[in-house]
């Protein structure tokens, strides 16, 4: 009886999800790999390696919940400032990740997309990324969207340049530029109609955006969690979604949505 009571108590502690209100687009700033490793007296790259395994677990959990888009901040335009050895390790991660995980993605009907300037990545990394997108192009389930060599300000600048070129070429009048027109020039346009995250999660206790999807998160709900990314899992994802479901989203108006 004692074992049964313990099992019931554990079940009662599980997050209570409203499956009818699962956020369609979840974006995650995967923070804390290095701190996770340092706390275990391991090199920082061990944290990145474990973080890759977490990506696999969370991807499957999100897909199982019916999430439409999962955007993961994998490498920012500022991450090049890190030590060369760490950058080199991070550039090899997508190769190992996709080589081992693409079959599972295809099996689960998950499509890979990428935001960011991947032309600066090493050729082998570019090939792994492009191959993963090609191999999953036919999938029409959840989109696993990686931000690689991505920066929110860089994305906005590039969009402004595209619009300026169209104006200069006489293809567009400045008065025609509105939010919709601007949005079509952003890297997230490939995610329409789910281009704007409903929920943004950041792990490891930090509470800042770090130049991630600055335009798209204008009305996102933010959930900051203390756990380092390598410790994140499906249960913590559900906990973040429960927190999201307790929020009242009004989008600047008065009625809850």
Image: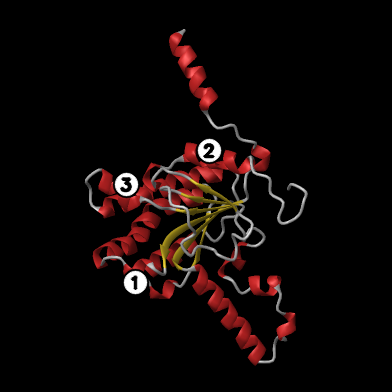
Dot 1 lies on which element? loop
- The label shown at residue 122 is 1
Q: Position of residue 21 (x, y in %)?
A: 66, 42
Cβ atoms under marks 2 and 1 closer than 8 Å = no
Q: CA distance from mark 2 to mark 3?
A: 20 Å
Instruction: Report the coloring of the rendering.
Output: secondary structure
Q: Nearer the viewer, residue 166 or 123?
A: 166
Q: Position of residue 71 (x, y in %)?
A: 52, 56
The vertical placement of 67 against 213, above or below, is above
Residue at x 54%, y 23% (from the top left corner) = 12
Q: Quadrant of residue 138?
A: bottom right
User: What residue is disc 2 on?
Assistant: 239
In the displayed orientation, state which residue is furthest to the right.
255
Q: Quadrant of residue 161?
A: bottom right
Residue at x 48%, y 65% (from the top left corner) = 211
Tell whether 254 sits left or right of 142. Answer: right
The crowding category of the residue bearing disc 3, from other C-alpha atoms within 10 Å (few below 14, some 14 to 19, many at least 20), is many
The vertical placement of 253 against 160, above or below, is above
User: What residue is disc 3 on?
Assistant: 36
Which label lies toward us, 2 or 1? 2
The vertical placement of 74 against 12, above or below, is below
The crowding category of the residue bearing disc 1, from other C-alpha atoms within 10 Å (few below 14, some 14 to 19, many at least 20), is few
Q: Earlier in the sequence, mark 2 or mark 1?
A: 1
Residue at x 49%, y 59% (from the top left corner) = 209
Residue at x 26%, y 48% (from the top left corner) = 38
Q: Position of residue 150 (x, y in %)?
A: 46, 68
In the displayed orientation, state which residue is furthest to the bottom.
169
Cβ atoms under marks 2 and 3 closer than 8 Å = no
- The label shown at residue 193 is none
Tell whether 12 sits left or right of 91. Answer: right
Dot 2 lies on which element? helix
């Amino acid at each position: 009886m004692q074992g049964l009571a313990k099992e019931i108590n554990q079940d009662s502690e599980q997050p209570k999800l409203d499956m009818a209100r699962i956020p369609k687009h979840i974006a995650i700033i995967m923070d804390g790999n290095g701190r996770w490793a340092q706390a275990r007296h391991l090199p920082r790259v061990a944290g990145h390696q474990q973080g890759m395994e977490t990506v696999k677990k969370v991807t499957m959990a999100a897909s199982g919940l019916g999430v439409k888009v999962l955007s993961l901040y994998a490498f920012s335009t500022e991450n090049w400032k890190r030590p060369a050895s760490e950058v080199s390790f991070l550039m090899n991660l997508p190769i190992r990740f996709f080589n081992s995980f693409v079959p599972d993605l295809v099996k689960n009907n998950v499509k890979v997309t990428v935001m960011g300037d991947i032309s600066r990545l090493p050729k082998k990394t570019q090939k792994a990324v492009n191959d993963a997108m090609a191999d999953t192009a036919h999938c029409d389930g959840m989109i696993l969207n990686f931000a690689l060599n991505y920066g929110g300000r860089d994305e906005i600048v590039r969009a402004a340049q595209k619009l300026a070129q169209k104006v200069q070429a006489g293809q567009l009048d400045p008065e025609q530029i509105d939010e919709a027109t601007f949005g079509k020039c952003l890297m997230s346009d490939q995610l329409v109609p789910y281009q704007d995250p409903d929920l943004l999660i950041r792990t490891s206790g930090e509470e800042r955006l770090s130049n991630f999807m600055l335009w798209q998160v204008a009305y996102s709900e933010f959930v900051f969690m203390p756990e380092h990314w390598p410790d994140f899992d499906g249960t913590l994802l559900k906990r973040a979604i429960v927190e999201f479901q307790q929020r009242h989203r009004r989008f600047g108006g008065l009625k809850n949505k």
